[in-house]
Image (cartoon, rainbow, N blue to C red):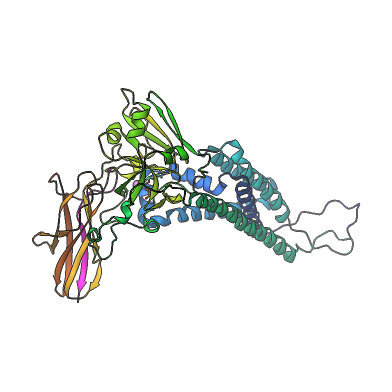
């Protein structure tokens, strides 16, 4: 119907909200294209790359606040935050693009470049990891150009003044763009999950049988005194703390780790090499420095693997080496004193957990476990290298305000009863106490600030694991304050003084308020 000789259509004044809707729809598509291309080419997703950069750049107070407020949901909240920020930005860019189309293009490309820089900067990725993000942004920018200038309703006759823009058509095209985007995001998730499943499948049954029966079968029943807390924490219930938004991808067939730095003979060890070494099992309680008094970031497992000191002896530690500094496949680092590997404690390179291959979320193919040290200085998951070095190198958390040394502090926790109402009469007060490397000698409980009463301790299997305890209590109606303290085998009783988790672990007694009726 248009007259080929007519001058171009007068520009249509499109309301800005139309641009905002177009911006969001194009934004969804841009992110989706980025995620799908990343999944298909097996590089880090742009959203995860940005999220990881945010995590790495967060100050200590923010990390503590996030763990406090969101617990293990912290990563979900982070992703949600990124999506909300992107949606707002896309809406603003789209709105501005209705007046100045170049703003849309520049705005989308700017976000694409941010995603690309983040992806290329992630450990284990190359500059190519940025390509999906840029391509996504280009697609988004082109689609925005189209969507943000909806077609005018064509006017029959000579008048070139448009009657308005075609709303129906606009909503259909925007909806289609967003819909395709949502499907592509779903597909990218499926591709990424599939890859994780492939790694999980590769982990199945890859451990050769042990010479001796597994410790797991030898844990005496009387090691568990608490009716709530099993002595060995099942893998699925074991706390998980790490900075990883997606699992580092390691194929055990071509993964290897090295021992380098101040050693006479650097070693490279494949998964098969590690499996061929004498396998040992140890019960060790792993604890996070971010575990608050009474907190959940602690678990006890039977770890299986090889002794670190044997490998360090084989490599030959050079004089002057001060720190065992380890790096993970996802670029996380930590370090502990050389003595902690060589003083006789059972620092291990771990391949198995509670009778099965080390689960992906706990560090497959291999991780470190060092009895007596908090995880943040010692327990590197998805191990890539161990470097003997001086204190010049700083592990991930050190410049972020956490202490360089992280020996685990003596602590105890009441698991039963937890706060709330309980019935009057005979009740059990029970829980766990730990002082890895020193061992637990005594646990005492007091009610309403009265005399400390010694609890009965469960079987003592090792100084490196928690010990369960229980005390019978005649509960009388009313409100009561229960309190616990532990004494380690050196005779030190844990302090009542409250200290926050930062910089080197919380102190203070765990207290539980109960209502008896
Ligand atoms: N690669 C990597 N390893 C890591 C971490 C991490 O963020 N990345 N966190 C450490 C911390 S702070 C703790 S407490 C333990 C927790 O181990 P888990 O998740 O198996 O319980 O892992 C340690 N190893
Ligand atoms: Mo931790």
Instruction: Give residue 156's position: percent from left, percent from top.
Output: 87, 64
Query: Which residue corresponds to the image point at 91% horizontal and 53% vertical from the top-left?
Result: 4
Give the side of residue 419 with respect to residue 41, left or right.
left
Give whichever of 328, 224 is nearer the camera.
224
* Magenta segment includes 515: yes
Position of residue 497 in the picture relative to residue 189 (left or right): left
Say which of 115 and 356 sits in front: 356
Residue 260 sits in which quadrant?
top left
Q: Is residue 128 magenta?
A: no
**Quarter of the image with the C terminus in it:** bottom left
- The percent coordinates of residue 15 (x first, y second) are 67, 59
Q: Quadrant of the N terminus?
A: bottom right
| Residue 414 at x, y percent in the picture | 23, 60
Res 257 seen here? yes
Q: Residue at x 17, y 53 (%)?
A: 486
Q: Is residue 401 visible?
A: no
Is 120 situated left or right of 340 in this image? right
| Residue depicted at x 80% and y 63% | 153
Q: Residue farthest to the left?
A: 451
SS majority, magenta = loop
Query: What's drawn in magenta, residue-wise?
Result: 498-517
Comparing 133 with 235, the one in front is 235
Q: Nearer the viewer, residue 344 or 386?
A: 344
């Amino acid at each position: 119907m248009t007259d080929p000789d007519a001058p171009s259509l007068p520009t249509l004044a499109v309301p800005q909200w139309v641009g905002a809707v177009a911006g969001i729809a194009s934004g969804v598509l841009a992110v989706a294209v980025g995620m799908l291309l990343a999944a298909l080419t097996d590089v880090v997703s742009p959203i995860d790359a940005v999220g990881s950069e945010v995590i790495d750049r967060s100050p200590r107070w923010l990390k503590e606040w996030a763990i406090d407020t969101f617990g293990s949901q912290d990563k979900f909240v982070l992703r949600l935050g990124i999506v909300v920020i992107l949606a707002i930005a896309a809406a603003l860019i789209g709105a501005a693009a209705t007046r100045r189309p170049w703003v849309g293009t520049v705005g989308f490309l700017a976000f694409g470049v941010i995603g690309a820089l983040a992806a290329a900067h992630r450990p284990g990725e190359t500059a190519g990891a940025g390509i999906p993000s840029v391509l996504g942004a280009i697609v988004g920018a082109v689609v925005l150009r189209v969507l943000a200038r909806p077609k005018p309703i064509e006017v029959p006759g000579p008048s070139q003044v448009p009657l308005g823009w075609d709303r129906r058509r606009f909503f259909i095209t925007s909806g289609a763009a967003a819909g395709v985007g949502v499907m592509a995001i779903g597909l990218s998730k499926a591709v990424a999950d599939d890859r994780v499943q492939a790694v999980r499948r590769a982990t199945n049954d890859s451990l050769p049988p042990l010479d001796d029966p597994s410790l797991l079968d030898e844990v005496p029943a009387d090691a568990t005194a608490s009716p709530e807390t099993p002595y060995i924490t099942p893998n699925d219930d074991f706390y998980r703390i790490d900075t990883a938004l997606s699992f580092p991808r390691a194929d055990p067939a071509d993964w290897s780790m090295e021992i380098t730095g101040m050693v006479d003979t650097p070693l490279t060890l494949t998964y098969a090499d590690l499996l061929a070494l004498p396998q040992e099992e140890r019960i060790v309680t792993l604890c996070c420095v971010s575990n608050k008094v009474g907190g959940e970031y602690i678990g006890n497992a039977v770890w299986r693997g090889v002794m670190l000191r044997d490998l360090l002896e084989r490599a030959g530690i050079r004089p002057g080496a001060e720190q065992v500094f380890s790096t993970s496949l996802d670029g996380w680092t930590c370090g502990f004193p050389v003595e902690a590997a060589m003083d006789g404690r059972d620092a291990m390179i771990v391949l198995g957990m509670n009778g099965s291959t080390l689960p992906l979320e706990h560090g497959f193919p291999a991780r470190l476990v060092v009895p007596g040290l908090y995880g943040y200085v010692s327990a590197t998951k998805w191990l890539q290298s161990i470097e003997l070095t001086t204190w010049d190198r700083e592990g991930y958390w050190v410049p972020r305000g956490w202490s360089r040394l992280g020996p685990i502090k003596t602590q105890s926790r009441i698991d039963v009863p937890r706060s709330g109402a309980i019935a009057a009469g005979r009740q059990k007060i029970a829980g766990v106490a730990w002082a890895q490397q020193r061992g637990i000698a005594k646990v005492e409980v007091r009610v309403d600030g009265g005399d400390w009463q010694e609890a009965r301790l469960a079987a003592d299997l090792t100084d490196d694991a928690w010990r369960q305890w229980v005390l019978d209590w005649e509960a009388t109606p009313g409100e009561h304050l229960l309190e616990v303290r532990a004494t380690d085998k050196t005779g030190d009783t844990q302090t009542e003084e409250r200290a926050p988790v930062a910089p080197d672990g919380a102190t203070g007694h765990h207290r539980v308020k109960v209502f008896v009726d």
